[in-house]
Image: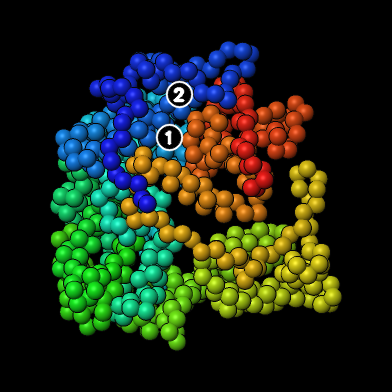
């Protein structure tokens, strides 16, 4: 049974005007598992003192950053409209919210890409000054730096890179917008949402088409230039934010080749808040469809229309394709037009499930009464092109470098169709790699025989054959065998679709979402035995700040006793820390205590 969205009792007293329970919050004891060397307790900043960079109490900031979004969700579920409108304005003004927002923009993958001001906040002093300067109302507009990302068919997608200050100020309201977006979202919407992925959208689409009584007609729709054509009036009407702040973001303009250009329409694609703004604007299509095509007695009280949406792509099913074109498509076009958008004529098509449809790089089609999923021709063509480019650029490289370049590409592409067995497609790609590697080996060694080339190159193609492949020496002096990954050897694992009502910001769903995230990370860590065991020992959390360790947060292996001081490289001397806590350990000279292993954790590993 799914947990009910009831109002839960608060775990703390009244919240102060700044969004913190000021006295009780800052008098809590230091986190267990952390102590400073020399016997002195690691102290942080007082509630009235300036924010002190590495001395900041991230554990408490993370706790308050999680508590207020939960209260926003509970207020919305309890229909407390006044409280639901007040809490989103309180979170960005809390100092813990400002700290979490700055930490998010300075520790993601784009933290080393500057904007038009060429400023980066990498040092603790710069971060402390940025937290103190973050004020939601004091927001001067900052133009974004315009760039372009290559796409298929020679096209380019415009990309906007805001300055660091603008990213931090955008991350502040995002803390409040994320729980609102998850609460008001369509049940089968997966793109740009927390804890959801393309696998959830593909599972829902497959389930809608696999039944024997499923609809036969399919409408695969895509929006033409979604972010570039978004109407500012449509976004302002559907996004619960301060109108002045939203207008400044949308009208800040962009800088390209040293010249400033005004922004008339659209949202800057590349900012941290852009996906949430686009998602809130596109939500709500399922409601008018269910109203117009409500279940009837003739349909057996079953839904007449099924909708699956991922970002700006959607999949709608109906009894016949004629009904889709005459009844459903006008409703979708009218809904998009209210937001200044239109369906792409080249990407939108009406089809039958026996003819097949492409969705998120996957071709879904019914063959002989059975619904089959395979990688689309476009995705196979793209991976072949990447493999050819990688082999051409590393034509004269050694085996180690060649395998190091190809393995991430092969494993990443083969893991995407892992839920369904596409063995024939994977074998064709693998055969092409073998042929091209063989041609490259003969070109690099024209005087060598096949008996010499086979153990040097092709034994790495069959790790179960018992032959010894090429080896390399690691930092500790041990020999490591290099295997070129085999795409057909990827194990088949069917994902479990997330429940439609699941909300990561809702305290009632917190246990479910964390267990699901832990299961997904455990699957991703297959083959990395040491990291998986350490992650289970720590229950998936940092021993310093109690933050959940995921692929988005990242982690670093920290030695409890330094290697230069005689420490070993074994699991007993290692812990996993996020990047910020790892920097605190070295800057503040903190000793990390290894958490007690969970019961049977090592047995599960």
In this rendering, is residue 186 above or below 102? Answer: below
* Residues packed near mark 2 inside 10 Å, few (<14), some (14 to 19) or many (20 plus): many
Ranked by sequence position, the earlier of labels 2 and 1 is 2
The answer, for residue 154, to whether it is visible in the render is: no
- For the residue pair 371 and 391, the one nearer the viewer reads as 371
Percent across and percent down for residue 51 are 40, 21
**In the figure, is residue 152 to the left or right of 287?**
right
Q: Secondary structure at mark 1?
A: helix
Image position of 316 with respect to 111: above or below: below
In the rendering, at what x and y percent does residue 260 appear? 27, 48
* Position of 153 relative to 74 (above/below): below
In whole angstroms, how far apart are the C-alphas of marks 2 and 1?
Answer: 11 Å
Secondary structure of the residue carrying numbered label 2 = loop
User: Which residue is at 65% across, 50% downward?
Assistant: 528
Q: Residue at x 62, y 63 (%)?
A: 406
Looking at the picture, tell me which residue is in the foreground, 5 or 25: 5
Q: Which residue is mark 2?
A: 56
Is residue 84 shown to the viewer in this render?
yes
* Residue 228 image position (x, y, % from top left): 26, 58
Q: Which residue shows up at 25% across the image and 30% down it?
A: 90
Colouring used for the render: rainbow
Of 524 and 268, nearer the camera is 524
As drawn, 224 above or below 551: below
Rate crowding at label 1 as few (under 14), some (14 to 19) or many (20 or more) other CA atoms within 10 Å: some
Say which residue appears at 50% left-offset and 30% top-offset.
Answer: 545
Count of labels shown?
2
Q: Is residue 231 left or right of residue 65?
A: left
Which residue, given by chain and number where applicable, does mark 1 sit on? 103
């Amino acid at each position: 049974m799914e947990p009910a969205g009831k109002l839960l009792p608060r775990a703390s007293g009244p919240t102060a005007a700044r969004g913190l329970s000021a006295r009780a919050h800052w008098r809590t004891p230091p986190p267990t598992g952390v102590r400073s060397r020399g016997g002195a307790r690691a102290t942080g900043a007082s509630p009235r003192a300036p924010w002190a960079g590495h001395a900041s109490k991230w554990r408490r900031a993370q706790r308050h950053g999680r508590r207020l979004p939960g209260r926003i969700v509970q207020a919305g579920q309890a229909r407390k409209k006044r409280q639901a409108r007040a809490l989103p304005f309180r979170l960005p003004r809390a100092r813990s919210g400002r700290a979490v927002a700055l930490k998010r923009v300075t520790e993601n993958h784009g933290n080393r890409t500057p904007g038009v001001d060429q400023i980066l906040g990498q040092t603790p002093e710069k971060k402390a000054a940025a937290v103190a300067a973050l004020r939601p109302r004091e927001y001067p507009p900052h133009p974004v730096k315009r760039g372009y990302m290559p796409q298929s068919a020679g096209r380019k997608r415009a990309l906007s890179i805001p300055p660091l200050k603008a990213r931090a100020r955008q991350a502040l309201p995002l803390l409040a917008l994320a729980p609102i977006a998850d609460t008001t979202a369509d049940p089968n919407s997966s793109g740009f949402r927390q804890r959801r992925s393309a696998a959830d959208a593909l599972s829902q689409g497959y389930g809608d088409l696999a039944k024997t009584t499923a609809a036969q007609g399919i409408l695969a729709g895509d929006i033409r230039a979604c972010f570039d054509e978004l109407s500012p009036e449509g976004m302002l009407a559907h996004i619960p934010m301060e109108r002045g702040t939203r207008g400044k973001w949308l009208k800040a303009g962009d800088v390209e080749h040293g010249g400033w250009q005004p922004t008339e329409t659209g949202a800057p694609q590349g900012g941290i808040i852009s996906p949430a703004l686009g998602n809130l604007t596109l939500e709500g299509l399922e409601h008018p469809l269910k109203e117009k095509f409500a279940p009837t007695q003739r349909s057996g009280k079953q839904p007449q229309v099924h909708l699956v949406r991922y970002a700006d792509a959607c999949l709608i099913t109906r009894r016949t394709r004629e009904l889709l074109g005459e009844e459903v498509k006008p409703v979708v076009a009218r809904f998009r037009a209210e937001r200044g958008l239109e369906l792409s004529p080249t990407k939108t098509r009406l089809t039958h499930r026996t003819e097949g449809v492409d969705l998120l790089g996957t071709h879904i089609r019914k063959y002989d009464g059975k619904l089959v999923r395979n990688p689309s021709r476009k995705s196979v063509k793209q991976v072949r092109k990447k493999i050819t480019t990688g082999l051409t650029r590393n034509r004269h490289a050694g085996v180690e470098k060649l395998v190091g370049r190809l393995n991430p590409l092969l494993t990443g592409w083969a893991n995407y169709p892992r839920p369904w067995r596409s063995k024939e497609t994977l074998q064709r790609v693998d055969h092409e790699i073998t042929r091209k590697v063989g041609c490259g080996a003969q070109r690099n060694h024209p005087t060598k025989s096949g008996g010499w080339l086979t153990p040097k190159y092709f034994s790495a193609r069959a790790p179960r054959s018992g032959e010894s492949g090429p080896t390399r020496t690691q930092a500790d002096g041990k020999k490591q065998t290099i295997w070129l990954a085999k795409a057909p050897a990827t194990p088949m694992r069917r994902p479990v679709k997330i429940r439609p009502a699941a909300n990561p910001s809702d305290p009632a769903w917190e246990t479910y979402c964390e267990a699901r995230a832990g299961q997904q990370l455990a699957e991703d860590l297959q083959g990395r035995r040491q990291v998986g065991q350490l992650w289970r020992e720590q229950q998936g959390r940092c021993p310093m700040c109690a933050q959940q360790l995921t692929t988005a947060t990242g982690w670093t292996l920290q030695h409890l006793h330094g290697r230069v001081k005689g420490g070993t490289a074994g699991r007993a001397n290692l812990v996993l820390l996020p990047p910020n806590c790892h920097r605190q350990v070295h800057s503040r000279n903190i000793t990390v205590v290894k958490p007690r292993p969970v019961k049977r954790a090592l047995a599960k590993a």
